[in-house]
C-alpha cells in the first residue's frame, strides 16, 4: 500500500512535536519514580548532551540530592545563586546583617549605600499588622446571593469551630480563625476566612480550612462550592517601613527635588510604576528567596496591592518633612514565615535565617520591607542624578569579563578597563583579555 504525501507530512509533524532533540520525545514513563541521578541520565540520553552537563548537574552544591528531590518533582540538579550580605542597616534600633540571594549586579550595593545615608537619622522604623491570611471559597448557583450572604455570616461560630479544629497546632501557638467576610460578585458568593497564621506563611493552613468548611457553606447557601484556595493579596498582613534622609546626606535640595519628581512620575504613570516597583522587589525578593520563602506569593501580593486604588501606582510614598529632609515610606503585604516549606528544608535558607538572627515571622517581615524601601531610595537617587547605568554597569563589568572568558585576577583587570572606557561590552572585554594574555 502506497502512503500519501499527506501521511508522510503528518508523520514528520509528529516527529517534530515529539521533540527536537535526540531520543523519542518528552514522554518518559516512570520518570518521576527515578532518582535524580537516573533522571539526569535519561535527560542526557534524550538530548545528546555529554559529560560536561552531567558533571555540572551532579554537583548539587550545599543541597543534597535527597533534600532537593523532596522539595520539587523530577529533580535533576540545583541552580546556585550568589548570596550577598547587605550591611549598614539600622532597623528599629538593631543592626542585622541581611542575606540577599540574587543574580543581578548592584542590588546588594544599592541597599548598603541607601542604608548608610540614613544612619545619622536613625535608620528605618517598621511596624506590622497581625499575620492574617485569607482563604477564599467560591460558591456558584446560589439562588438568592444577598440572602445567602447574611445566612453565612450568621454561622460564624460554627465556621470558626470547624476551621480551628482543622489545625489544632496553629491554635496551640495562638493562631486560628479570626473573622468571616462574605462578598457577592456578580452571581457568585465569595466567602473569606481570615486566619491568624502566626509564624507560618499560612497557605497550607488556610487551604485546609477552606476545604473543611466548603461543604457546609454550599449547604447553607443552596449553592455549589467550587474554588477553595488562599488569596495572595494578603492585604491584612502588611509590613511598613519609614526612614528619613537629611539633605546633607543625599546631596542637597536639587537631588531631593529630582527624586521627588521621579516618585511623582512613578505614582502617576503605570509604565514607570512597573519599573519603579520592580526595583523595590529587587531587594524584597532577594531576602525572601534567601530565607526560603515564596517569592511569587510576595510579588503577586505586592503588585496587586499597588493597584488597590483602581490604578497601578508606586508602592512607596515620598515627601519632605518640616526641616526639608526627604522622607520615604513603604507599606505592602508580606506573607513570609519561619516554619514549613524551604525555610526549614533548604540548608542555605536555614543558615541565612541564622545570620539574620530572627525568631519570628514578624521580625523577618520588618527587615524585608526596610530593605525594599532602601532599594527604592537607591534606585531613585541613581536615576535622578548620575543615571542608573553608570553605577550598575560598573558593577556589571565583572559579569561581562567572565562572559568574555576572563578567570581569576583577569576578571578585575578586564572589568577595570571596561569601566575606565565607559564601554561595558563583551566584544571589548574579549579584546582586552586577548591583549592581557599576549595573544
Image: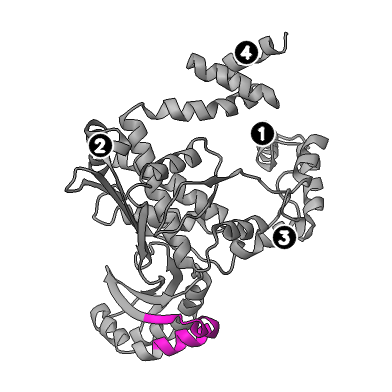
> Quick one: label 1 or label 3, which is nearer the N terminus?
1
Q: Are marks 4 and 1 in contact (CB under 8 Å)?
A: no
Say which element carries label 2.
Answer: helix
Within 10 Å of the Cα at label 4, are there few (<14), some (14-19), or many (20+) other Cα atoms? many
> Which mark is nearer the camera, 4 or 3?
4
In the image: residue 146, left or right of residue 90: left
Q: Residue at x 42, y 27 (%)?
A: 389
> Quick one: label 4 or label 2, which is nearer the N terminus?
2
Between the residue at mark 4 and the residue at mark 3, the CA separation in whole angstroms equals 43 Å
> Quick one: label 2 or label 1, which is nearer the N terminus?
1
Q: Residue at x 47, y 74 (%)?
A: 198
Q: State the image coordinates of residue 192 (x, y, percent, origin top left).
A: 36, 74
Q: Say whether residue 221 is visible.
A: yes
> Quick one: label 2 or label 3, which is nearer the N terminus?
3
Provide the residue designation for mark 3: 67
Specify the quadrant that holds the C terminus.
top right
Within 10 Å of the Cα at label 1, are there few (<14), some (14-19), or many (20+) other Cα atoms? few
Q: Which residues are magenta?
A: 159-178
Residue in front for this viewpoint, 398 or 217: 398
> Which mark is nearer the camera, 2 or 1?
2
Specify the quadrant that holds the N terminus.
top right
Look at the picture and state if 188 lies above or below 353: below
Provide the residue designation for mark 1: 9
Q: State the image coordinates of residue 208 (x, y, percent, origin top left).
A: 51, 77
> Which mark is nearer the camera, 4 or 1?
4
Task: Specify whether residue 73 is painted magenta.
Answer: no
Magenta stretch: dominant secondary structure: helix
Provide the residue designation for mark 4: 432
Within 10 Å of the Cα at label 3, are there few (<14), some (14-19), or many (20+) other Cα atoms? few
Numbered tag placed on residue 256 in the rendering: 2
Say which element carries label 3.
Answer: helix
Between the residue at mark 1 and the residue at mark 3, the CA separation in whole angstroms equals 46 Å
Amino acid at each position: 500500500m502506497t502512503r500519501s504525501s499527506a501521511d508522510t507530512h503528518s508523520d514528520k509533524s509528529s516527529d517534530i512535536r515529539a521533540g527536537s532533540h535526540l531520543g523519542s520525545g518528552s514522554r518518559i514513563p516512570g520518570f518521576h519514580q527515578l532518582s535524580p541521578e537516573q533522571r539526569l541520565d535519561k535527560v542526557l540520553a534524550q538530548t545528546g548532551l555529554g559529560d560536561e552537563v552531567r558533571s555540572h548537574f551532579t554537583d548539587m552544591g550545599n543541597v543534597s540530592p535527597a533534600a532537593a528531590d523532596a522539595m520539587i518533582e523530577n529533580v535533576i540538579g540545583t541552580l546556585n545563586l550568589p548570596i550577598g550580605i547587605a550591611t549598614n542597616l539600622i532597623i528599629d534600633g538593631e543592626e542585622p546583617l541581611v542575606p540577599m540571594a540574587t543574580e543581578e549586579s548592584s542590588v546588594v550595593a544599592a541597599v548598603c549605600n541607601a542604608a548608610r545615608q540614613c544612619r545619622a537619622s536613625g535608620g528605618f522604623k517598621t511596624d506590622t499588622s497581625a499575620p492574617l491570611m485569607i482563604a477564599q471559597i467560591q460558591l456558584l448557583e446560589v439562588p438568592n446571593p444577598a440572602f445567602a450572604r447574611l445566612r453565612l455570616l450568621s454561622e460564624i461560630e460554627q465556621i470558626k469551630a470547624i476551621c480551628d479544629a482543622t489545625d489544632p497546632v496553629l491554635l496551640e501557638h495562638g493562631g486560628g480563625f479570626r473573622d468571616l467576610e462574605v462578598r457577592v460578585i456578580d452571581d457568585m458568593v465569595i466567602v473569606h476566612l481570615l486566619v491568624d497564621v502566626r509564624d507560618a506563611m499560612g497557605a497550607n493552613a488556610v487551604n485546609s480550612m477552606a476545604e473543611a468548611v466548603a461543604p457546609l457553606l454550599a449547604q447553607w447557601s443552596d449553592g455549589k462550592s467550587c474554588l477553595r484556595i488562599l488569596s495572595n493579596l494578603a492585604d491584612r498582613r502588611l509590613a511598613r517601613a519609614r526612614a528619613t534622609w537629611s539633605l546633607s546626606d543625599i546631596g542637597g535640595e536639587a537631588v531631593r527635588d529630582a527624586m521627588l519628581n521621579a516618585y511623582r512620575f512613578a505614582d502617576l504613570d503605570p509604565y514607570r510604576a512597573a519599573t519603579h516597583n520592580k526595583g523595590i522587589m529587587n531587594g524584597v525578593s532577594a531576602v525572601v528567596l534567601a530565607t526560603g520563602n515564596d517569592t511569587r506569593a510576595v510579588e503577586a501580593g505586592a503588585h496587586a496591592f499597588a493597584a488597590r486604588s483602581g490604578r497601578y501606582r508606586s508602592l512607596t510614598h515620598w515627601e519632605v518633612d518640616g526641616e526639608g529632609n526627604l522622607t520615604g515610606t513603604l507599606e505592602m503585604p508580606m506573607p513570609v514565615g519561619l516554619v514549613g516549606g524551604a525555610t526549614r528544608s533548604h540548608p542555605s535558607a536555614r543558615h541565612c535565617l541564622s545570620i539574620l538572627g530572627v525568631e519570628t515571622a514578624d521580625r523577618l517581615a520588618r527587615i524585608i520591607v526596610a530593605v525594599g524601601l532602601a532599594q527604592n531610595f537607591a534606585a531613585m537617587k541613581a536615576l535622578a542624578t548620575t543615571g542608573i547605568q553608570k553605577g550598575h554597569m560598573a558593577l556589571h563589568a565583572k559579569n561581562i569579563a567572565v562572559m568574555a572568558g576572563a578567570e581569576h585576577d583577569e576578571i578585575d583587570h578586564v572589568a577595570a578597563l571596561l569601566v575606565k572606557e565607559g564601554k561595558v561590552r563583551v566584544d571589548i572585554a574579549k579584546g582586552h583579555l586577548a591583549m592581557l594574555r599576549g595573544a
